[in-house]
Image: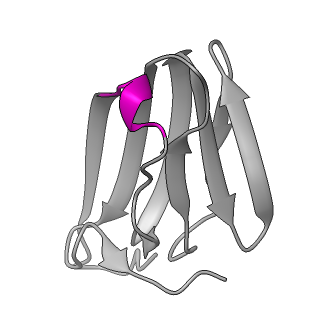
Amino acid sequence: MDQSPGSRLRSICCESTRPAVQRVSATAAHTHPGSEAFYVLKGELSQKTPHGLARLTAGQGMVGHGTDTPMVVSNSGSEDLREFALFVVDANKPFSSPAPLE
């Protein structure tokens, strides 16, 4: 992430819910221009990246793999997923960009 003079960072905090009925759906493969962290409030979250598949359940959190890492995030449990996410991204770039992920 560019932290040179004149660069701007933006932080975004959000809580989201993915109903269990939609658990088969996942985000499209994408990247973020910065860092992120997740904390699962309820249910189970899966994040697939080139580093592998991570699964988090309620009470667990993780720091993402870094700037521009391709990922797919989904509800992989049998109940609704509630998560808290924190992003610190380059404000001069789009928040999310499509990305290939094998």
Camera-side residue: 71 or 3? 71
Residue 22 falls inside the magenta stretch: yes
Instruction: Give me the residue at 30% from left, 79% from top.
Output: 5
Residue that lies at the very extreme toward the right in this rendered image: 52
Residue at 50% of width from left, 77% of height from top? 68
- Name which residue lies at 19% across and 78% down: 92
10 with respect to 36 (left or right): left
Choose top left, top right, bottom left or bottom right for residue 50: bottom right
Q: Is residue 89 above or below residue 73?
A: below
The type of colouring in the image is one colour
Left-right relation of 16 to 59: left
Left or right position of 10 against 2: left
> Residue 15 at x, y = what percent?
31, 26
Q: How many marks?
A: 0
Residue 36 sits above or below residue 37 on the image: below
Image location (x, y in percent) of residue 4:
37, 81
Q: Which residues are magenta?
A: 17-23
Q: Is residue 64 magenta?
A: no
Residue at figure coordinates x 47%, y 37% from the top left: 23
Q: Tell which residue pokes out farthest to the bottom in this image.
A: 100
Q: Position of residue 12 (x, y in %)?
A: 26, 44
Q: Quadrant of the C terminus?
A: bottom right
Residue 28 x/y as whole percent: 40, 67
Vertical side of 89 occupied by 92: above or below: below
Q: Nearer the viewer, residue 89 or 81?
A: 81
